[in-house]
Image: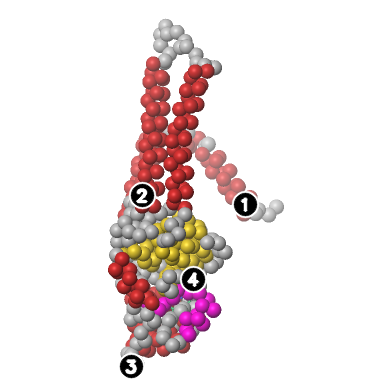
């Protein structure tokens, strides 16, 4: 008979089980030495887990540092439920210990009075939990409704999910950008979200909870930060190979900085002067097909319209004004921007597996020229 893989594995398992029961391993499983070792190992695992958290300091995604009213609302609700649950837990544990000690079997003790079928007790322990659940349910449902709908007067930002980056479009200003959502601090902004391919989910934990981006549908998310600052966001729905590399930033700035930013973004790109390296880069950009997928808005040229029809990649018009790129995963923590950009242009799928920007087999010189060009496009 031919042994299939599964049969072989089964045999292995059987051998392992047999070995465990063999006389060589007759020592009882829970000897104290072994237990101590197990606990030491568990402790070590926790310690190492903490170390890895320190390492990803650059990707802080925590709901415990609310930086805006919506996240604050969620946080308040969490702590309210947490403390009620803690109270219930403490009460149950204390009651359990007291009852176990008080009614334990002692020399000459009578059997304690039995409560089975006592209507009064049954009513009390049904009504009290019902009141507790209601006390949690009312503010929870209220928060869910309050947090869902945007104020109709709020400034709108359309957020479009792509594998694996976020596009942000400001319909009131005709501004298009990627990965970095710039908002004025202290004011409610309404994210109107959809997706161009699969389902994504936008999650900026210090500003709000998660919300889906669904192809063919619009969902809303209220976004507001108390103070200017930078907040991390991540796609929170598995959306394909590079899902883990699909991040974004929310950049909250003052009202005046926001006005300036909008005015700058509305400008078409300034073309580099002939004879410079940036100009060489612009030539590469035009001649190597980059504009098939990337809009680059130049006065008097229709490049951007052509770009949108082929394949929708991030708008590169003011690329250098964005401090992160490639789904806000580059530059990596501690890496300088040009190194990251060189890495990206040389072979995108090696940086983001499955990337829809292919390896375009650019030469080292073309890459250098492109970097000079892109880093000038503020
Ligand atoms: C077939 C379409 C396609 C072509 C051709 C293409 N790109 Fe891209 N590019 C993309 C996509 C899609 C992304 C987003 C990838 C991601 O983040 O997952 C991207 C991202 C980028 C980014 C990062 C932008 C950001 O803000 O995240 C740069 C820079 C870039 N491309 C430059 C170029 C240059 C320069 C060329 C020409 C040599 C080029 N691309 C050609 C599709 C393309
Ligand atoms: Cu996603």
As helix, strand or loop, the secondary structure at mark 4 comes to loop
As helix, strand or loop, the secondary structure at mark 3 comes to loop
Question: Closer to the N terminus: mark 2 or mark 1?
Answer: 1
Question: Closer to the N terminus: mark 1 or mark 4?
Answer: 1
- Residue underneath mark 1: 6
From the viewer's side, name the closer residue of 76 and 14. 76
- Residue underneath mark 3: 275
Question: Closer to the N terminus: mark 2 or mark 4?
Answer: 2
Task: Using the image, determine if residue 90 lies above or below residue 232.
Answer: above
Q: Is residue 315 a member of the stretch shown in magenta?
A: yes
Question: Is residue 237 toward the left or the right of residue 80 in the image?
Answer: right
Question: Closer to the N terminus: mark 4 or mark 3?
Answer: 3
Q: How many labels sit on residues?
A: 4
Label 4 beta carbon less than 8 Å to ligand 1: yes
Marks 2 and 3 sit apart, C-alpha to C-alpha, by 54 Å
| Residue visible at 34% across and 58% down in the picture | 225
Q: Which residues are magenta?
A: 302-318
As helix, strand or loop, the secondary structure at mark 1 comes to helix
Callout 3: 10 Å neighbours few (<14), some, many (20+)?
few
Question: Of circles 2 and 4, which is in front?
Answer: 2
């Amino acid at each position: 008979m031919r042994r299939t893989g599964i049969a072989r594995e089964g045999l292995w398992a059987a051998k392992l089980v047999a070995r465990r029961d063999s006389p060589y391993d007759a020592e009882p499983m829970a000897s104290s030495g072994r237990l101590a070792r197990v606990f030491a190992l568990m402790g070590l695992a926790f310690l190492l887990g903490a170390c890895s958290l320190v390492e990803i300091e650059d990707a802080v995604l925590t709901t415990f540092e609310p930086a805006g009213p919506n996240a604050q609302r969620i946080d308040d609700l969490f702590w309210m439920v947490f403390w009620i649950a803690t109270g219930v837990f403490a009460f149950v544990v204390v009651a359990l210990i007291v009852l176990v000690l008080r009614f334990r079997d002692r020399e000459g003790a009578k059997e304690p009075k039995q409560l089975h079928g006592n209507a009064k007790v049954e009513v009390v322990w049904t009504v009290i939990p019902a009141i507790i659940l209601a006390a949690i349910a009312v503010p929870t449902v209220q928060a869910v409704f309050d947090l869902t709908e945007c104020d109709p007067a709020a400034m709108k930002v359309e957020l479009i999910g792509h594998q694996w980056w976020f596009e942000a479009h400001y319909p009131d200003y005709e501004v298009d950008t990627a990965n970095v959502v710039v908002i004025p601090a202290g004011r409610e902004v309404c994210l109107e979200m959809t997706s161009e391919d699969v389902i994504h989910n936008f999650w900026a934990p210090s500003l709000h909870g998660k919300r889906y981006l669904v192809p063919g549908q619009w969902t809303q998310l209220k976004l507001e930060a108390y103070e200017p600052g930078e907040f991390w966001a991540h796609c929170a729905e598995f959306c394909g190979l590079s899902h883990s590399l699909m991040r974004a930033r929310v950049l909250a700035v003052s009202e005046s900085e926001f006005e300036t930013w909008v005015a700058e973004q509305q400008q078409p790109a300034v073309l580099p002067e002939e004879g410079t390296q940036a100009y060489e880069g612009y030539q590469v950009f035009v001649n190597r097909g980059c504009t098939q997928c990337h809009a680059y808005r130049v006065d008097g040229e229709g490049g951007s319209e052509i770009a949108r029809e082929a394949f929708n990649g991030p708008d590169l018009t003011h690329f250098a004004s964005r401090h992160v790129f490639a789904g806000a995963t580059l530059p990596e923590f501690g890496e300088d921007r040009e190194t990251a950009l060189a890495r990206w242009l040389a072979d995108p799928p090696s940086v983001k597996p499955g990337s829809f920007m292919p390896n375009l087999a650019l030469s080292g010189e073309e890459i250098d020229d492109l970097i000079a060009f892109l880093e000038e496009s503020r």
